[in-house]
Amino acid sequence: MGPLIAVMGSADPGRRLDPPLTDADDALKACEEIGAELAAEGCRIIVYSSEAQFVESRVVTGFLTREDLPDGSVQVRPPYEDGDIDFPLRDERPEVFDLRYEPGNDWEVSFYRSLRDVDGVILVGGGRSTLVTGMICLAFGIPLYPLAAFGGSARKVWETMNRSTHHATADEVSAMGAQWGPGSAQRLVRLLGTQRERRAEKQREEARSRLGATLRAGLGAVTGMLLLLLGFATIPLTYAVESSTAVNLSALIVGALATGTSGAITRTVFDRETHWARTAVLGMSAGGIAFLLFVSAQLAASPDILAGEGVRRLLFFVLAVGYVSGFTFDAVYNRLKQAEPPAPPVLPGLPTGVPGGATPPQGPGGA
């Protein structure tokens, strides 16, 4: 099925529009040309009311100049009870019209809700509803072509496009302000199609980005799980081999770094983040620092703990400390930032005033 295009607005000379309508007759003729060109390009159209003050009837008139239209090419979305659907040739060619009643009698609700289904919007003249429609299209990235040449709110929307984000280039926006003439309908449909292509490409890029983020998150979760298993594997390793200082120290280091990295990666999964490499490095560093502080305290109390079998019991604590440090690496680094560096030890034999020497005595009036 072809793209669904909405052409809306008003070219009623009896309405007071801001800016004023410049040429109602030319605007209505332009609507017929637009309808004919949309039909020639295999598009479908969506219309809402056949009232004379709106442009839809003239668009349908031009659209039906093509004889071999597919069934349902003209989608009609009127309110349930109070809708004008007396479009040209509706009785003669009923198969072309796809009548879809909207629940309720509030036409604005059904009208704005239908915009989520369209692939492009063309604005001609119009008042407040046309202006709101243009703002909705710009906000949600719906391909848009306001005909600035005929005034009305369509010109306001065109002026807004110069300072908002959309799928049209600056040259294309400038072309939308050109006077209507031969070939204008073809240019309009072509530029609207270009916007649809850019929108589709952006959606594909976003889909690829989401897929890449999902794959990265999955890879991170698997990596974190494997590192956690590696940390746990150091426990049976210390029981399987003969105890020695080198083996025990290696098991402690590998276990702390592996679980610290695993904890940091688990943090990214918990926070639903996808870029886990930097977090893994920070977690590994935090786990290593926590390991050094914890083991240093144990060595101060038991200097021979690394050479004996007590390291097997110590390993359980090191793995837990490493994992928690990696998971809460931000708290670890904040604590390190707040900590003051230790004072250098006093070395005997160095003169006063030299770093590491004794502090010289303070005389009267000294600090």
Image (cartoon, helix red, strand yellow):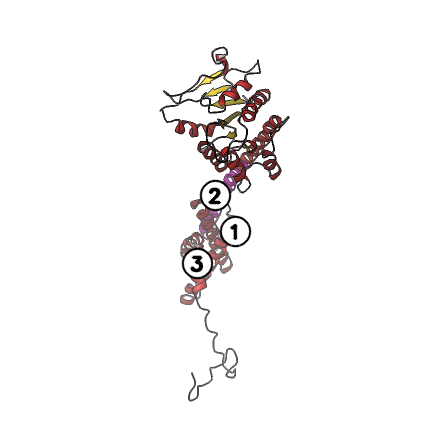
Identify residue type, mark 2.
Ala
Q: Main secondary structure of the magenta part?
A: helix
Using a 10 Å C-alpha cutoff, classify the residue at mark 3 as few (fewer than 14 neighbours), some (14 to 19) or many (20 or more): many
Comes first in the chain, label 3 or label 1: 1
Comes first in the chain, label 3 or label 2: 2
Residue identified by numbered label 3: 332
How far is mark 2 from mark 1, CA to CA?
14 Å
Which range of residues does the magenta coloring cover?
207-236
- Residue in front for this viewpoint, 9 or 194: 9
Identify residue type, mark 3.
Val
Quarter of the image for the N terminus: give it: top right
Comes first in the chain, label 2 or label 1: 2
- Left or right of 16, for residue 66: right
**Residue 240 at least partly seen:** no
Count of residue discs:
3
Residue identified by numbered label 1: 278
